[in-house]
Image: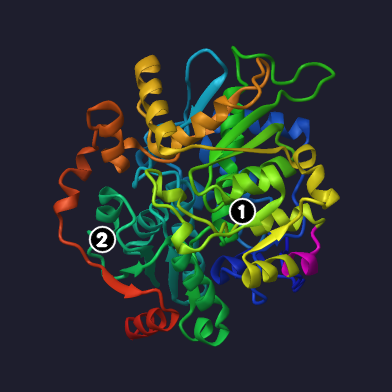
Amino acid sequence: MHYLSTRGDATARKFCDILLAGLAPDGGLYLPEHYPQISTERLGQLRAIYRTQGYAALAFEILQLYIDDIPAADLRALCEKTYTEDVFGTREIVPLRRLGEDGLWIEELSNGPTLAFKDMAMQLLGNLFEYELARRSEELNILGATSGDTGSAAEYAMRGKRGIRVFMTSPHGRMSPFQQAQMFSLQDENIHNIAIRGVFDDCQDIVKAVSNDHAFKARYRIGTVNSINWARLLAQVVYYFAGYFQATQSPHPSPLPEGEGAMRVSFTVPSGNFGNVCAGHVARQMGLPIERLVVATNENDVLDEFFRTGVYQVRGAEHTYETSSPSMDISKASNFERFVFDLLGRDGAATRALFEQVAREGRFDLSGDARFADAAARFGFASGKSTHADRLATIRDTWERFGSMIDTHTADGIKVAREQPASADVPMIVLETALPIKFEATIVEALGRSPERPARFEGIEALPKRVTVLPADVQQVKDYIAAHCQ
């Protein structure tokens, strides 16, 4: 399998090269030259593998379709090292729980070390990085941006890893106290936290700018862990298959009705940077029977606006709202470019032109393009928006009716999922984003009580913190990296 850039650079690259590279040299994002296809027969085989051998075995079967430059035995061992019951709490790794009797399910993705879905990919990424760097006898300086959960997941996955330093930018003062404490309390020498005076989009712009300075990137061996890194998105594809297999197993309707193909499901995904739902897009393109992929946004509704109107309009810092689902306080969705590339028939020149237009004008408009007109039918996307009031109401309702406590982002997902056309034959799976403790203040506002806190995180907010505050200035971030790579 080879990889190409969404902006037209067709230079053939293998997985391990793009694993360490992040952005393509032309500023685009990497995608495989094609999506491997899963037949109905193969889907049944993967179901059996998941049931009998577990999540790690399923992950190996999916990943090996895209990774042919790591020996199969090594790749299997990396999956087995990553996806263990000790790390993720259950044999299923991503168990499904039913929410009432209306066909709505929650897929639990937040049982890992930092209590957020980002652990699902980041734990694998840390092991892949360490493995490949050891093979090459090289080091890597990881530069990332986080709106809340990516940073802690990356730092917990990379702490103490040989040959790796992490430089994680975050918007100063815009994460929850728990999220800040998870990151800033780490004392490992290879972890560096940089709080940027600005919003998440400023952090993300800095990461892209540094990645596009090819001389600096080469000199300091800069890599990325944000979802612009294909390896991270690929790891997320696996839990769409696992969720599907659980939602369609007995005693539900037969997964293979005679003459009809496989039973279908839908997913609703709380979305800010489009990485999580883009993994669902990849799974659907591979042949996983997904009816709809529903993008759930908060008040920062750039993605909802696009799927409703065809207009992609990014917003400046002054119009990027600080909300109670802060991990989605994003108005420039990096992974969206991958979907646009597929929407435009994998036309790299056209994709480049659109995103260069965004850089100049802050928007593009596909409302009159026939390719957008049938996008819902071709790709299954729908969307919706949730507000703070919606969040509170959904958290209360879910607790009072079902005894299930959910975080603010998952509440956005549930609210939007319930607005979609219901079908008794198509289960709707909402992807859980994080555990409620990460957003304690809003849970208390909604329920009048604090969520449970895992014992290992007791008193975390009071721990000493290691963080450097910098302005939203690319050069100052570069200087900081250079000074700490001696």
Nearest the viewer among 306 and 109 is: 306
Up/down of 353 relative to 334, above or below = below
Q: Position of residue 85 (x, y in %)?
A: 39, 37
* Inter-mark Cα distance, 2 to 1: 37 Å
In the displayed structure image, the side of residue 276 where residue 350 appears, left or right: right
Residue lying furthest front in this view? 318
Comes first in the chain, label 2 or label 1: 1
The residue to which callout 2 is attached is 184
The residue to which callout 1 is attached is 72
Label 1 residue SS: helix
Amino acid identity at mark 2:
Phe
Q: Position of residue 79 (x, y in %)?
A: 51, 48
How many circles with numbers are drawn on the protein?
2
Residue span colored magenta: 346-352
**Other residues around mark 1 within 10 Å, as few (<14) / some (14–19) / many (≥20):** some
Res 334 quadrant in image: bottom right
**Label 2 vs label 1, nearer the camera:** 2
Q: Position of residue 57 (x, y in %)?
A: 56, 40
Examine the rendering and report whether any part of residue 109 can be seen. no
Magenta residue check for 279:
no
Examine the rendering and report whether any part of residue 129 can be seen. yes
Up/down of 345 relative to 383, above or below = below
Overall secondary structure of the magenta stretch?
A: helix
**Other residues around mark 2 within 10 Å, as few (<14) / some (14–19) / many (≥20):** many
Nearest the viewer among 374 and 100 is: 374
Q: Residue at x 46, y 70 (%)?
A: 134
Q: Residue at x 74, y 25 (%)?
A: 262
Res 283 quadrant in image: top right
